[in-house]
Amino acid sequence: MGVLLLVHVLLVAVAASAPAADAWGKEGHYMVCKIAESFLTEEASTAVKELLPGWAGGDLAEACSWADTVRFRYKWSSPLHFADTPGDCEFNYARDCHNTKGEKDMCVVGAINNYTAALKDSSSPYDPSESLMFLAHFVGDIHQPLHCGHTDDLGGNTIKVHWYRRQSNLHKVWDVNVIETAMKDFYDNDQSTMIQAIQQNITEEWANEEKQWETCRSRTKTCAEKYAAESAKLACTAYEGVEQESTLEDDYFFAALPVVQKRIAQGGVRLAAILNKIFGGKSRLQIQSS
């Protein structure tokens, strides 16, 4: 059974009352986008490469963490990385998709819908390269469970824990620590090996689920609300048994790792499906040999 990883770092209070987010860490975002690349149609792959900035070298995965690097320059974008809930294990768009000022649609679900629409509309005022990079990043974010964590603890950021012998917080555990531990213990710190393991799981262990992941019957929007609802439910499980100063070790790690690996896989498959729908007219998946 393939073991995988992901990363994320989410809501850290920038101002006293304003949560910010880093989402999966760079490795997690890279994996989501690298998996997505392997499922793109030829038309979508060509369009994506044409929109990427030169520094990305035609590689979507290289640009997948760009949205985190501009978070402080584009301060308005901070709430677009997450969609926290009151802790009822459900996501409700009308209730939960807003920023700290109460402005609607300012959450990761609204952002995915917005940038998808912008890429479909050639007359959109948004920069298409930035729209692509925001979209790729936010699809990764929404699959990290604590990006739909609880509002009262900033998605687990204020819950201080020990990850084995190291100090951490619950959000960082899901963002960084699970992936770091898995990378060290199972992948010899080789990211390409982790990606190959995830892709193998998609074609073997999850072969009967993969088509369902990409299916979206909405004609006007994406299915980002569904992805947020999945994460909100998973987040509730992530909180179970965790208190301030808890020590999280093997039991927690081996329970979290399968969730992390599947959410990275789902994020990659769904990102490809969205891009194929935008640029290729269909969402037929095509895994390419690496």
Image (cartoon, helix red, strand yellow):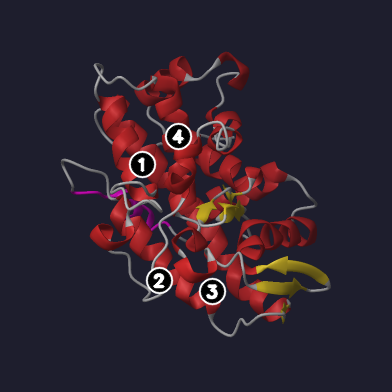
Q: In which quadrant will I find the C terminus?
A: top right
Q: Residues within 10 Å of mark 3 (few under 14, many from 20)?
A: many
Can the viewer see residue 285? no
Q: Distance between the residues labelled 4 and 1?
A: 8 Å
Kindly state the secondary structure of the residue where label 4 is placed.
Answer: helix
User: Nearer the N terminus, badge 3 or badge 2?
Assistant: 2
Residue at the extreme left of the image, as rendered = 219
Question: Any mark on residue 111, and which?
Answer: 1
Kindly state the secondary structure of the residue where label 3 is placed.
Answer: helix
Residue at the spot x=30%, y=58% of the render?
226
User: Nearer the N terminus, badge 3 or badge 4?
Assistant: 4
The part of the chain drawn in magenta is: 207-217
The residue that label 2 is drawn on is 233
Disc 1 marks a residue whose amino acid type is Ala
Q: Does the magenta stretch include residue 103?
A: no
- Nearer the camera: disc 3 or disc 1: 1
Q: In which quadrant will I find the N terminus?
A: bottom right
Can the viewer see residue 73? yes
Kindly state the secondary structure of the residue where label 2 is placed.
Answer: helix
Residue at the spot x=54%, y=77% of the render?
239
The residue that label 3 is drawn on is 238
The residue that label 4 is drawn on is 134
* Label 4–label 1 contact, CB within 8 A: yes
Disc 3 marks a residue whose amino acid type is Ala
Give the percent coordinates (x, y) of residue 98.
34, 52
